[in-house]
C-alpha cells in the first residue's frame, strides 16, 4: 500500500500523490489527467476499498448498510489522499461510509435547509428575495458523507431529482426580482462543456439576471475537469463566480492549485465554503492552515458552515461553540481575507444566520465598549444625536 505523506508536509505543502494507489496499474499521464478516465475509475465498491485500505468494522458495516442513503464514489485523485490504515484520517472521514450513517436521531432531517418547500418549479429553489438555487444534476464526482442533499443526490436516496428546465427558465423570465442564479445539484461541472454553455447562454439571455454562480467540488475531487477549454467557455459569461468546497488543507494538491489558478486566470472569482466537521477541521490550527493555503491558491475563504442536521451526520457534527472558537482564533491572528463568515443554515428553511464571537461588550447613548482579539477593551464615543428635521420634530416650514 502507498504510505501516506507526513501530516505536516501534506497539510502545508502542495503535494502531488499521483498515481498513488494506481502506481501498479501503469496508468499513463494522459489517462490520469483525463477527467473521463478519473470518473470511469472511481472507487465504488467494498472490494475496491479493501484492495487499498485496512477498513475498520464501522467502515465495512457502513459500506454494506448505508448504500440506500448515498452512493459510494471517490475519484482516484481524491482517493490517493486517504491514509491506508487510519480510519480517523480527515480525508477518509469525509468520503468513506460508516455505520453511524444508519443511526436515527430525532433532530435530523432529510431536507434540513427546507429546499423542497421553497421549490416553485421542480429543481428551482427560491428561498431568498433576489436569488435562486438551480439544481441542474443529481451527480457528483465523489460523494461527501454529510451531503445536505443526500435525499436526491447519487440516485440512492429517498427522492429523485426531476428538474424541469424549460419551466425553470420561464419562472426566471417572469420574476424580474431575481438577479442571482446559483447552479448546483449535484455538481454542474460534471456536465459537458456544450450542455453547461447552453445553460449559461440561456440564463444570460434573461436581462434582469446580473450574476451567475457555480457551486462545485469538482476542482477538488476532479481537478482534471478544469481544462483550458472549459475556462475559456466560462469566461464568455462574466460576471460568473465560483464557490468551491475545501474542508482540509491536504485537499489542496498541486493539481488542485493549478486548476484553481486556471479558473482565476480566466477571471472567475473564487470563494471557499467549508463545512465544520468533527475529526476533519474542528481544530483552530488545522483550519488556519487551510484558509492560509486557500489564499495561496487565490481562493477567498467565504463561509464556514455549521454542519446541517442531515440524517446520519451525528458523528461528524460539532458544537456551535467550536465554530466560534475557530473564528476567534483566526481574527487578528491572520489577515482578514482569510477569515470566513461562520453561519448556521437555520433548520427547516430559515436561511443562513451569521454567528460571530462577542466583540461588543456594552453600548449606550454615549459610548460603545468593544474588545479586540487580545481581549483588550476599548471605548468608542458615539456621536451626539443629529437634530431632527423640522417636519419630524413637529414644526412646519412656511
Image (tube, rainbow, N blue to C red):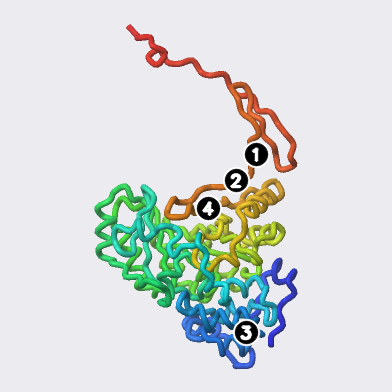
Q: Are marks 2 and 1 in contact (CB under 8 Å)?
A: yes
Give x and y (percent) for residue 236: 39, 62
In the image, 94 versus 250, the foreground residue is 94
Give x and y (percent) for residue 116: 36, 61
Q: CA distance from mark 2 to mark 3?
A: 42 Å
Q: Is residue 112 above or below residue 14?
A: above
Q: Residue 151 sits in which quadrant?
A: bottom left
Which badge, 2 or 4, comes first in the chain's sequence? 4
Tell me the residue at 46%/62% (across/down). Answer: 109
Tell me the residue at 64%/30% (across/down). Answer: 362
Q: Residues within 10 Å of mark 1 (few under 14, many from 20)?
A: some
Which badge, 2 or 3, comes first in the chain's sequence? 3
Q: Residues within 10 Å of mark 2 (few under 14, many from 20)?
A: some
Whether residue 390 is visible here, answered yes or no, is yes
Q: Residue at label 2?
A: 356
Instruction: Classify the position of the C terminus by image quarter.
Output: top left
Q: CA distance from mark 1 to mark 3?
A: 48 Å
In the image, 234 versus 50, the foreground residue is 50
Q: Residue at label 3?
A: 19
Looking at the image, residue 147 sits to the left or right of residue 17; the answer is left
Q: CA distance from mark 3 to mark 4?
A: 38 Å
Which structural element holds mark 1? loop
In the image, 364 versus 37, the foreground residue is 364
Q: Give the foreground label among 3 and 4.
A: 4
Q: Residue 273 sits in which quadrant?
A: bottom right
Q: Residue at label 1?
A: 359
Which badge, 4 or 1, comes first in the chain's sequence? 4
Q: Residue at label 4?
A: 344
Which badge, 3 or 4, comes first in the chain's sequence? 3
Which structural element holds mark 4? strand
Q: Are marks 2 and 4 in contact (CB under 8 Å)?
A: no
Amino acid at each position: 500500500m502507498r504510505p501516506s505523506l507526513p501530516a505536516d508536509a501534506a497539510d502545508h505543502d502542495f503535494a502531488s500523490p499521483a498515481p498513488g494507489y494506481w502506481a501498479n496499474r501503469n496508468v499513463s499521464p494522459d489517462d490520469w489527467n483525463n477527467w473521463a478516465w478519473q470518473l470511469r475509475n472511481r472507487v465504488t465498491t467494498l472490494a475496491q476499498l479493501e484492495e487499498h485500505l485496512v477498513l475498520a468494522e464501522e467502515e465495512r458495516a457502513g459500506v454494506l448498510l448505508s448504500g440506500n442513503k448515498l452512493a459510494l464514489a471517490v475519484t482516484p485523485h481524491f482517493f490517493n489522499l486517504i491514509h491506508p490504515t487510519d480510519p480517523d484520517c480527515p480525508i477518509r472521514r469525509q468520503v468513506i461510509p460508516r455505520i453511524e450513517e444508519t443511526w436515527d436521531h430525532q433532530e435530523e432531517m432529510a431536507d434540513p435547509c427546507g429546499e423542497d418547500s421553497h421549490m416553485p418549479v421542480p429543481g428551482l429553489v427560491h428561498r431568498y428575495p433576489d436569488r435562486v438555487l438551480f439544481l441542474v444534476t443529481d451527480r457528483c464526482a465523489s460523494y461527501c458523507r454529510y451531503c445536505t442533499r443526500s435525499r436526491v443526490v447519487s440516485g440512492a436516496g429517498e427522492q429523485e431529482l426531476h428538474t424541469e428546465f424549460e419551466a425553470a427558465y420561464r419562472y426566471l423570465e417572469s420574476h424580474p426580482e431575481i438577479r442571482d442564479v446559483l447552479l448546483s445539484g449535484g455538481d454542474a461541472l460534471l456536465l459537458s462543456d456544450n450542455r453547461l454553455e447552453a445553460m449559461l447562454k440561456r440564463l444570460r439571455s434573461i436581462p434582469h439576471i446580473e450574476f451567475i454562480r457555480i457551486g462545485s467540488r469538482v476542482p477538488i475531487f476532479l481537478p482534471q475537469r478544469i481544462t483550458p477549454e472549459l475556462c475559456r467557455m466560462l469566461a464568455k459569461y462574466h460576471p460568473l463566480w465560483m464557490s468551491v468546497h475545501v474542508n482540509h488543507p491536504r485537499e489542496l494538491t498541486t493539481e488542485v492549485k493549478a486548476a484553481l489558478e486556471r479558473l482565476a486566470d480566466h477571471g472567475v472569482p473564487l470563494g471557499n465554503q467549508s463545512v465544520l466537521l468533527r475529526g476533519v477541521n474542528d481544530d483552530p490550527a488545522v483550519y488556519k492552515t487551510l484558509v492560509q493555503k486557500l489564499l495561496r491558491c487565490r481562493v477567498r475563504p467565504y463561509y464556514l458552515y455549521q454542519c446541517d442536521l442531515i440524517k446520519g451526520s451525528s458523528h461528524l457534527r460539532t458544537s456551535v461553540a467550536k465554530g466560534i472558537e475557530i473564528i476567534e482564533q483566526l481574527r487578528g491572528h491572520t489577515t482578514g481575507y482569510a477569515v470566513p463568515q461562520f453561519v448556521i443554515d437555520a433548520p427547516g428553511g430559515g436561511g443562513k444566520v451569521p454567528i460571530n464571537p462577542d466583540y461588543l461588550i456594552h453600548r449606550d447613548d454615549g459610548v460603545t465598549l468593544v474588545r479586540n482579539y487580545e481581549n483588550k477593551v476599548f471605548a468608542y464615543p458615539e456621536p451626539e444625536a443629529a437634530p431632527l428635521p423640522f417636519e419630524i420634530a413637529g414644526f412646519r416650514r412656511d
